[in-house]
Image (cartoon, grey):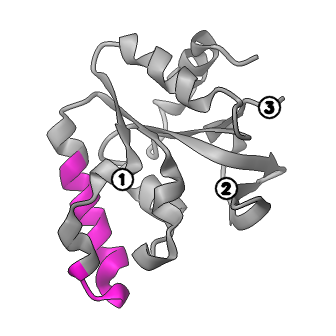
Amino acid sequence: MVTDADVLKRWKYIAQDDEKLLILIGGPGSGKSKLIRELTFQDGWKICEARELFDDEFLEIPRADRPDKAIALVSAAIHRLNARVVMIDNVEFLFAPILNLDPVAMLKKLSRECPIIVSWRGSLEGNTLYFEHNGDPKYAKFVIDNPNHVICLDE
């Protein structure tokens, strides 16, 4: 079982990288959200829902322009949180086809400005990160550069 102490230990390693993104990955009920809530005791660590990073007007932006506009919009929302580390729960919102986003690329870019920890429903196989959605364990896949940026809760 992964504990908050395990996450903090890994975080010390991640904090040295240019991209300060840590993904907590596991299946439904694995404790991702609970673990993120436990980490809020850290000074300046704040939690938010992925949906809270977008305003209603985002869907009025033409679909093709959304990936570029999302970076600025989410960056502004993250900065308004005034957090040392932002923990994003329910990241599945970022995968909604209507948003037209590449969630991993977006999170990696944003993590250069503000450290980010996300909870992610899925699995890791080698250097391939899978996102689980609607019962499909491999709904989306992403190659990651450094598996140390992922903590698997199901192991």
Q: At which x and y percent is residue 136? A: 78, 63
C-alpha distance separating marks 3 and 2: 19 Å
Nearer to us: label 1 or label 3: 1
Q: Residue at x 25, y 54 (%)?
A: 75
* Magenta highlight: main SS: helix
Side (left or right) of 102 relative to 148: left
Instruction: Specify which label sits upstream in the sequence, 1 or 2.
Output: 1
- Rendered position, 122 above or below 39: below
Magenta residue span: 60-77
C-alpha distance separating marks 1 and 2: 24 Å
Q: Amino acid at mark 3?
A: Asp
Q: Residue at x 55, y 23 (%)?
A: 34
Nearer to us: label 3 or label 2: 3
Q: Which mark is residue 154?
A: 3
Query: Is residue 75 found inside the magenta-colored segment of the image?
Result: yes
Q: At which x and y percent is residue 59? A: 28, 76
Q: Which residue is mark 2?
A: 144
Q: Which residue is mark 1?
A: 51
C-alpha distance separating marks 1 and 3: 25 Å
Between 52 and 81, the one lying in front of the other is 52
Instruction: Specify which label sits upstream in the sequence, 3 or 2.
Output: 2
Q: Amino acid at mark 2?
A: Ile
Q: Residue furthest front?
A: 134
Q: Amino acid at mark 1?
A: Arg
Q: Quadrant of residue 60?
A: bottom left
Instruction: Specify which label sits upstream in the sequence, 1 or 3.
Output: 1
